[in-house]
Image: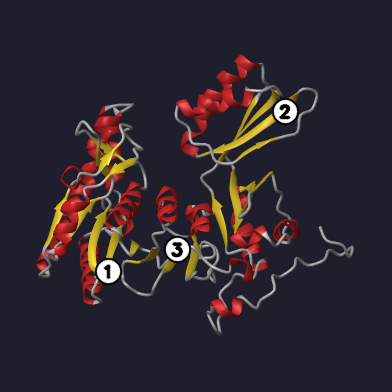
Amino acid sequence: MRLVVQKFGASSLGDAAGMTLLAERVLEARQRGDASMVVVSAMTSESERLTRLAQSVSDRPDARELDTLLSAGDQVSAALAAMALRRRGVDARSVSAAQLRLETDLQSGASLIRAVDRLGTRRALARGQVIVATGFQGVDVFGNLVGFGRGGSDVSAIALAVALGAAECEMYTDAPGIFTADPSICPRARLLPSLGYEEMMELDHSVARRPHPRAVELAMRHNVPMRVRSVDGNGAGTLITHEKNVLERLQVRAISHNADVAKVTVRRVPDKPGIAAQIFVALAREPVGVDLIVQSPSERGTTDVVFTVSHAEAARAHAVVADVARRIGAGEIELDDEIAKLSIVGAGMRAQPGAPAIMFEALAHAGINVHVICASDIKISCLVARADLERAVRELHESFGLRQEPATGGESKRGRRRPRRPRATRHGGRR
């Protein structure tokens, strides 16, 4: 009998109707002969409600107590899910991190999973029982409850899949899977039937309610297939796994974007060993999460350092960097929160060098200015004005031939399309 771990995110557990859909998906797995283990997040907006409650009594809530508070949301979901299953005749029981013996390190808020009680869980599954586990929480060696941070339920679901030898981990959301772009911006964005682990890690939240990058990395390391699909059960969703023959298809799989971006520029940073380390060590101590990082070429012994953070962390990042800049003798600090990150993603770009040309010609043709460029083997990102973002996404989606074909709706026809080249200017050249 195959074992599948079925993870239900907050967006799929909005109310009692969501619990009904959860029960239907578990029954569906049992009807096809699979054993099922369920992992749940807190219900929609519950984590935000609890966080606001904490902030109403403390400006800076203690990390340990905040983890304890937020874990209550998962326990509510787990208990309700078990009730919904038992009502349908399924022998189900909810378990907390302590009951599951899901051991973590000592870091509150973003702990790492160390061990899982395999034996007890396997015995329960062998008896035909459905275990409904809380997803956000673990316990440290002293028995303290610690949280995995935002998206932690994805991580614990994959960790359980690895520990129990599951054949697949199904991630249920309110979206049917992963798209070639945000469907609210590109109505003809296509649902991708499959995607590679590395490509999935590089996509921003815009293309779907994606699994947490930590979860994808863990699944890739242990070769656990993931499937992102809708909780309503319609369609097979998107299978995330090690893909074969990636060089035989069009290199760009999706257009990704992130509007929750602020750019911090540190001017005239002394070009000496260890100076950049001082900036980013100070940010890490806060902690401030840094995404894109670019350093300009040295000129007259100084350089400019540019990086991006979320809007919520922009003011804190500015204050931290301003303090470091005074100590190292750097110039002014500039903060721009009217920009957005735009990316093309695809493993095939490693062997097909034409993607950057198509990307930047398309943006130039649309009159969209590019501020910063950063590239890796499977992703090319740039910063654009937030006001230009939606137009830029649509332009790139069209230029790379990613749109849904009305007549076929098919992945197969896309493989035969040639990317649309930007049109020539009136002067006969390309912009």
Q: Which of 247 and 176 is in front in this view?
A: 247
What kind of residue is marked 3?
A: Ile
The Cα atoms of the two marked residues, 3 and 1, are separated by 18 Å
Tell me residue 297's x, y (percent). Answer: 75, 33
Q: To which residue does mark 3 refer?
A: 240
Nearest-to-viewer mark from 3 and 1: 1
- Looking at the image, the residue that sits furthest to the right is 427
Disc with the residue nearer the chain's start (1 vs 2): 1
Q: In this view, does 263 lie above or below 374?
A: above
Determine if residue 389 is in view.
yes
The C terminus - image quarter: bottom right
Tell me residue 192's x, y (percent). Answer: 50, 69
At horizontal 44% and vertical 55% (from top left) the residue drawn is: 220
Disc with the residue nearer the chain's start (3 vs 2): 3
Tell me residue 37's x, y (percent). Answer: 23, 60
Q: Of helix, strand and loop, which one carries label 2? A: strand
Residue 429, by quadrant, is bottom right
Q: In this view, does 52 lie above or below 429?
A: above
Number of other residues with Cα within 10 Å of mark 2, as a class: few under 14, some 14 to 19, many 20 or more: many
Q: Nearer the viewer, residue 154 or 181?
A: 154
Drawn side of residue 191 relative to residue 153, left or right: right
Q: Which mark is residue 303?
A: 2
Q: To which residue does mark 1 refer?
A: 2
Q: Circles 1 and 2: CB distance less than 8 Å?
A: no
At horizontal 16% and vertical 56% (from top left) the residue drawn is: 80
Disc with the residue nearer the chain's start (3 vs 1): 1
The Cα atoms of the two marked residues, 1 and 2, are separated by 56 Å
Q: Circles 3 and 1: CB distance less than 8 Å?
A: no
Q: Of helix, strand and loop, which one carries label 3? A: strand
Q: Circles 3 and 2: CB distance less than 8 Å?
A: no
What kind of residue is marked 1?
A: Arg
